[in-house]
Image (cartoon, rainbow, N blue to C red):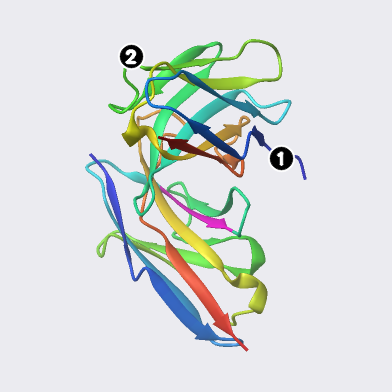
């Protein structure tokens, strides 16, 4: 079965540094998403992306966050200046014409 | 706003026993409801979804869930647990009118299956 690939699986960064999390969605999918899960908390929606623009974002997704689909295969989440509270597991997901999200296995981000 | 509550963060059953994972939702508009499963070191995988058609929804791996509007519930069941069902299960809701994929998740239930 096709899968969503996320790299790296673990990333450690210093507070205030920029970080880019990378995802390769399933090739014929049209909708792309980022979710995150802080340790011990619920999985939270961050942003959805369709037709090269953000279709919806949560309150968490402030000006420090941005998403991009730089080419036909990658989908990235950038955090401009990381804070301690950004430490979480970040999940990328994609879906086609049917509302069935395929999630990657996540990138564990640790901000020190 | 919508929300999801999963009753029981851990559920333990014996192999062959009934699996029942509880989910209650809150939504001001008719909801779309989902169950996802996460196996260790993998992403979340869709088990089944309710989208206002039949109230009893059948999913993969023998799981099913029943939408009960009067009880605002969407409990997940499987008649006979298998060792391979051990995983974390997430209930999620999307309010009608919001964009595809904007899901609100419950906190998850870890299912342990004993031989």
Q: Which mark is residue A63?
A: 2
**Disc 1 target residue:** A3
Which residue is depicted at the point 72% across and 25% down? A28
Which residue is depicted at the point 60% across and 21% down? A75
Over which residues does the magenta segment extend? B33-38
| Dots 2, 1 in contact, CB < 8 A | no
- Horizontally, residue A36 falls left or right of residue B97, namely right
Which residue is depicted at the point 63% across and 34% down? A8
Closer-to-camera residue (A69/A79)? A79
Residue B56 on image: x %, y %: 48, 63
Quadrant where the C terminus of chain A lies?
Answer: top left
Q: Quadrant of residue B40?
A: bottom right
Q: Quadrant of residue A22?
A: top right
- Horizontally, residue A20 falls left or right of residue B24, namely right
Which residue is depicted at the point 56% across and 66% down? B87
- Label 2 and label 1: CA atoms lie apart by 30 Å
Mark 1 burial class by Cα count in 10 Å: few <14, some 14-19, many 20+: some
Q: Chain of mark 2?
A: A
Residue B92 on image: x %, y %: 41, 50
As helix, strand or loop, the secondary structure at mark 1 comes to: loop
């Amino acid at each position: 079965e096709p899968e969503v690939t996320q790299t790296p699986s673990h990333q450690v960064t210093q507070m205030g540094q920029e970080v880019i999390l990378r995802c390769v969605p399933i090739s014929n999918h049209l909708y792309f998403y980022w979710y995150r899960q802080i340790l011990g908390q619920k999985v939270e929606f961050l942003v959805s992306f369709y037709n090269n623009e953000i279709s919806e974002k949560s309150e968490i997704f402030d000006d420090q966050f941005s998403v991009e689909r730089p080419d036909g295969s990658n989908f990235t989440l950038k955090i401009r200046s990381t804070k301690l509270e950004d430490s979480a597991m970040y999940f990328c997901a994609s879906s086609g014409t049917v509302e069935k999200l395929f999630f990657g296995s996540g990138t564990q981000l640790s901000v020190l | 706003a919508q929300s999801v509550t999963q009753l029981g963060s851990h559920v333990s059953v014996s192999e062959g026993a009934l699996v029942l994972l509880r989910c209650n939702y809150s939504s001001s508009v008719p909801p779309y409801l989902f169950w996802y499963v996460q196996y260790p070191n993998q992403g979340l995988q869709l088990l089944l979804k309710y989208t206002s058609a039949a109230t009893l929804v059948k999913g993969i791996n023998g799981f099913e869930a029943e939408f009960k509007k009067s009880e605002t519930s969407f409990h997940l069941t499987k008649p006979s647990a298998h060792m391979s069902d051990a995983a974390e299960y997430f209930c999620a809701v999307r309010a009608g009118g919001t964009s595809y994929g904007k899901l609100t998740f419950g906190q998850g239930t870890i299912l342990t299956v004993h031989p």
